[in-house]
Image (cartoon, grey):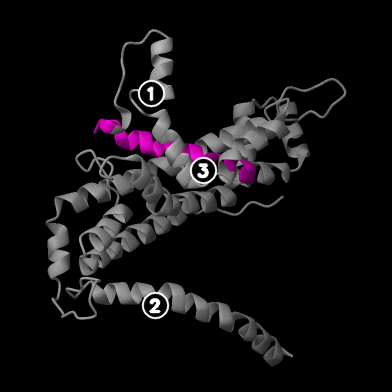
Amino acid sequence: MQHGKYRFIVGFLTVPLALYAIFVVWPFIQSIFYSFTNWSGLSPEFSMVGIDNYTRLVEDDVFWKSLWHSVLFALLVPLVTIGLALFLAFMVNVGGRKRRGGPAVTGVRGSSFYKIVYFFPQVLSIVIVALLFQFIYNPRSGVLNALLSGIGLDAQPEWLGDPDLALWCVMAVVVWATVGFFVVLFSAGMASIPAELYEAALLDGASRVTTFFKVTLPLLWDTVQSGWVYIGILALGAESFAVVQIMTVGPGGPDYSTTVMVLYVYQKAFRDGQAAYATTIGVALLVVTLAFAALVMRLGRRERLEY
């Protein structure tokens, strides 16, 4: 029986693991190999150059700027997104006042409507979101500066044209586009927590804030940790690339103030015809992503709570 069980499991895992190895693991191995060559990406011919690409990487000021911007994305976007999503989900599920004849723990009025509103950005393509905010940030005809003028403020920032503001504007768009998904995710997790735990805490005199940190967050921690890794990888990859590529001057400007690693990989490979150097940056991005995931999993490790 045991032999048959293992053969059954292996039979199910063989095809998925083979596909994963072919389409995920093998491209990574190829990238590492090409990073030691001078391949242009436009010709099948190349030669080995050793660690020349890595030496160039260390001396590349634009790479260090892109690395710093990617690190900011990986640290700040998940922090703001997860924090805001937890707050909104808690209010939707537990933050309401007790109603006469109703349960002791309930969400705010209209919580079902709020869930739909928060989730709405998820039905939009990130390209549409980036184009939408590009118009909002427009310094001459944008909604944001029009609102500032409407309330009597003379300041008319350039937003995406200001090197000191552009990166923060782009990160704000990523937060807006992703927070709704995590509100719904955390709402589902909070809905599964027995109401008796909240009622007992409130009867003992716990405030809403205490209830959140002592009841909700510990029981939701596994979901929060997984969400943190997920949003961090998104911020290092597709999400940051799309908004920077579409919204910013250059793209990646002004003065490389919004260039992130994944965009730099794209520019070197497809704009400059330096595929080998692009794979070298990609290897660095892989290391950063793995380090981020390992750090989050390490720092977030704690005893599992069940209910």
Q: Is residue 184 magenta?
A: yes
Tell me the amino acid under the disc marked 1: Ser
In the rendered image, residue 206, in percent from the top left (x then y), is placed at 66, 27
Tell me the amino acid under the disc marked 2: Trp
Instruction: Kindly identify which residue carries mark 3.
Output: 178
Q: Considering only vertical position in the picture, is 79 above or below 64? A: above
Quadrant (top left, top right, bottom left, bottom right) of the N terminus: bottom right
Disc 1 is placed on an element classified as loop
Residue located 40% across and 25% down the image: 142
Disc 3 is placed on an element classified as helix
Tell me which corner region of the image, top left, top right, bottom left or bottom right, holds residue 216.
Answer: top right
Left or right? Give the position of 204 relative to 249: right
**Nearest-to-viewer mark from 1 and 2:** 1
In the rendered image, residue 218, in percent from the top left (x then y), is placed at 60, 44
Q: Considering only vertical position in the picture, is 32 above or below 58? A: below
Q: Residues within 10 Å of mark 2 (few under 14, many from 20)?
A: few
Dot 1 or dot 2, earlier in sequence: 2
Please state the extent of the stretch shown in magenta in the rendering.
Answer: 161-186
